[in-house]
Image (cartoon, rainbow, N blue to C red):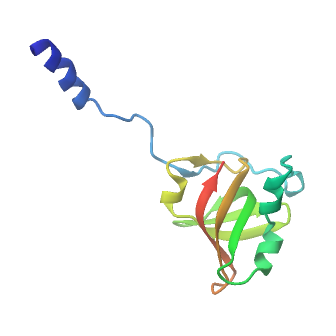
Amino acid sequence: MKLTVAPLLCCLLISTAYAEDNGGLKKDTAPPAPHSLDDGYRGAEDARIMTVEQAKEMHDGATISLRGNLIDGGEGDKFKFRDKTGTIDTVIPKAVFDGRTVQPDNMISINGSLDKKSTPPVVRVDRIQK
């Protein structure tokens, strides 16, 4: 009985995760040039992804899907997002990163809603996909 309790007790005392939970934007690499953001996607995916230029023309509250790079992190949950047509401000809560680390040279997809009440317009992101 003591032999089975000892390993069980050790397992419970050892911390379960050794990975750092520091998700978010890491600025240790430079983003690619805007003209080289073609990532080779074809087919149905292209139909659902819009450009920053198109997103800025949408109405307030529109659902936005963009593919590009997070190039700068401001204070708190404010970030700059860039694709080959331009940049737009985004609000990305820490919970959306879900512990994942994004670097400026990582091509990502973001989904959210457009907030045109703020100046300049902001995308409130609710999903990131690497």
11 left or right of 106?
left
In the displayed image of the protein, which residue is found farthest to the bottom? Answer: 117
Q: Position of residue 98 (x, y in %)?
A: 50, 51
In the displayed image of the protein, which residue is found farthest to the top? Answer: 3
Most foreground residue, 78 or 63: 63
Relative vertical location of residue 60 with respect to residue 10 in this rendering, above or below: below
Relative vertical location of residue 15 with respect to residue 34 in this rendering, above or below: above
In the displayed image of the protein, which residue is found farthest to the right? Answer: 35
**Number of numbered markers:** 0
The residue that appears at 54% across and 54% down in the rendered structure is: 97
Identify the image quadrant of the N terminus: top left
Most foreground residue, 63 or 56: 63
Give the image quarter of residue 69: bottom right
The residue that appears at 66% across and 48% down in the rendered structure is: 130
105 left or right of 14?
right
Most foreground residue, 18 or 63: 63
Give the image quarter of residue 29: top right
Q: Position of residue 115 (x, y in %)?
A: 64, 80
The residue that appears at 63% across and 84% down in the rendered structure is: 118
In the displayed image of the protein, which residue is found farthest to the left? Answer: 1
The residue that appears at 34% across and 34% down in the rendered structure is: 16
Q: Position of residue 94 (x, y in %)?
A: 49, 59
Most foreground residue, 25 or 66: 66
